[in-house]
Image (cartoon, rainbow, N blue to C red):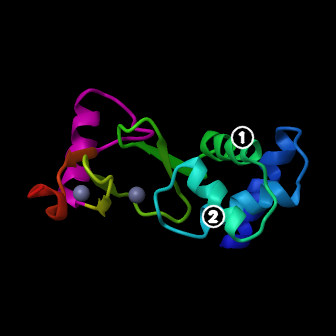
Amino acid sequence: MADKNLQKFKDVLRSEHLKVTPQRLAVFEEVCSTDDHRDADDIYLSLKQREKAVSRATVYRTVDLLLKYNFVSRIDIEDGKWRYEHWLDCTRHDHLICVRCGNIVEFSDKNIQIREKRIAKSFDYTLVRHVLNLFGYCSDCRGK
Ligand SMILES: [Zn+2]
Ligand SMILES: [Zn+2]
């Protein structure tokens, strides 16, 4: 499965007339290596820690490309920075976001998904994507 995705990414690079470079592949690999929700700087720093020489600009551009081709999705936790997560072999989920510490919890609720489909159908829409983020205080932050 991973190889198939890597192949897909290489095809995307070629279709965008971009070279398949070790740097771009490293960004792809880094993004796919965890289920965390990270901003582009986090991804850059993690690559740096692993001693991969990838420039910040390359990280940003590659992440944009991954977004364009649905390898990643991004969520807005309303602090001015997009959080990215890879979207490979991913079962659909939604997010609970703490407005104080930025903690993100994933959840999945069949009933919500069924309702969404019904709503779309009643308005004669074919869904292509959806966003559901719930904002609040996590249990650690609530008392503060
Ligand atoms: Zn919190
Ligand atoms: Zn998520």
| Circle 2 SS class | helix
Residue 4 placement (x, y as % from top left): 72, 67
Taking the magenta stretch, the answer to whether it contains residue 111 is yes
Looking at the rendered structure, the kind of residue marked 2 is Ser
The residue that appears at 35% across and 30% down in the rendered structure is: 125
Where does the magenta region start and end?
109-132
Name the residue carrying label 2.
Answer: 46
Q: How many marks?
A: 2
Question: Can residue 5 be seen from the camera position used here?
Answer: no
- The answer to whether residue 31 is left or right of residue 102 is right
Residue 21 placement (x, y as % from top left): 88, 55
Looking at the rendered structure, the kind of residue marked 1 is Arg
Of the image marks 2 and 1, the number of the one nearer the N terminus = 2
| Circle 1 SS class | helix
Q: Quadrant of residue 92?
A: bottom left
Q: CA distance from mark 2 to mark 1?
A: 16 Å
Residue 112 placement (x, y as % from top left): 21, 51
- The answer to whether residue 100 is left or right of residue 26 is left
Q: Residues within 10 Å of mark 2 (few under 14, many from 20)?
A: some
Vertical order, 124 against 115 (above or below)? above
The answer to whether the beta carbon of the residue marked 2 is less than 8 Å from any atom of ligand 2 is: no
The residue that appears at 45% across and 39% down in the rendered structure is: 128
Q: Residues within 10 Å of mark 1 (few under 14, many from 20)?
A: some
Q: Quadrant of residue 143?
A: bottom left
Name the residue carrying label 1.
Answer: 61
